Image: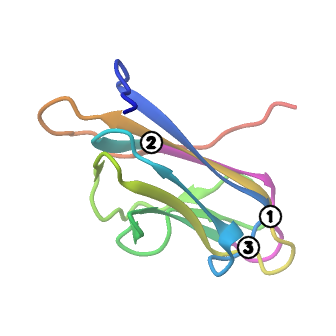
Amino acid sequence: MIRIKNLNEYVVELQISGTQTTNSAPTARCSAIVPFAGRISAVIGRLGVAGVTGAQATDLQVNGVSIMASGTLLSYATTSVVPTYASTLTANPTLVAKGDVLTLINSTIHSGTAAIDQCVYVTIEKQKSGSFADVLQTDTVDVVG
């Protein structure tokens, strides 16, 4: 048995590598297993190369069900590598149980040139006792070149 001790937070890295495709393709999704009960405390995403024309919509699911009440969590506008984040979560904070499966999945991609390489970090905060009062945090990443 693998035990994760002395961790209050666990960062899950979800990547969809290469040219982005939609959820009908197996390469349009990736998954990870939640190591302990807690909540999704933060999400941050980025594309390696921006897509052109239209937008890319990417969702985060827990056990195959979107964490959003409607729409998708991340939306990448044309020529943008940083997403906008939707705010209509099904539950905020979003609770997870040990063994839950987190899945990142593209529902739509840019209609002109598809984006390349997507990476999303999801922070799981361990629940020690009581309940969580904080809501999901989102942010963007700047690249210094």
Which of the pair 73/65 is nearer the observer? 65
Q: Position of residue 115 (x, y in %)?
A: 80, 64
Q: Which mark is residue 115?
A: 1
Q: Is residue 2 visible?
A: yes
Which of the pair 10/41 is nearer the observer? 10
User: Is residue 50 a member of the stretch shown in magenta?
Assistant: yes
Q: Secondary structure at mark 1?
A: loop
88 over 125 or under it: above or below:
below
**For mark 1, does the 10 Å Cα neighbourhood hold few (<14), some (14 to 19), or many (20 or more) residues?**
many
- Amino acid type, label 1: Ala
Q: Which mark is residue 42?
A: 2
Q: Position of residue 27 (x, y in %)?
A: 70, 67
| Image: magenta residue range | 43-55
73 over 125 or under it: above or below:
below
Q: Which mark is residue 21?
A: 3
- Amino acid type, label 2: Ala
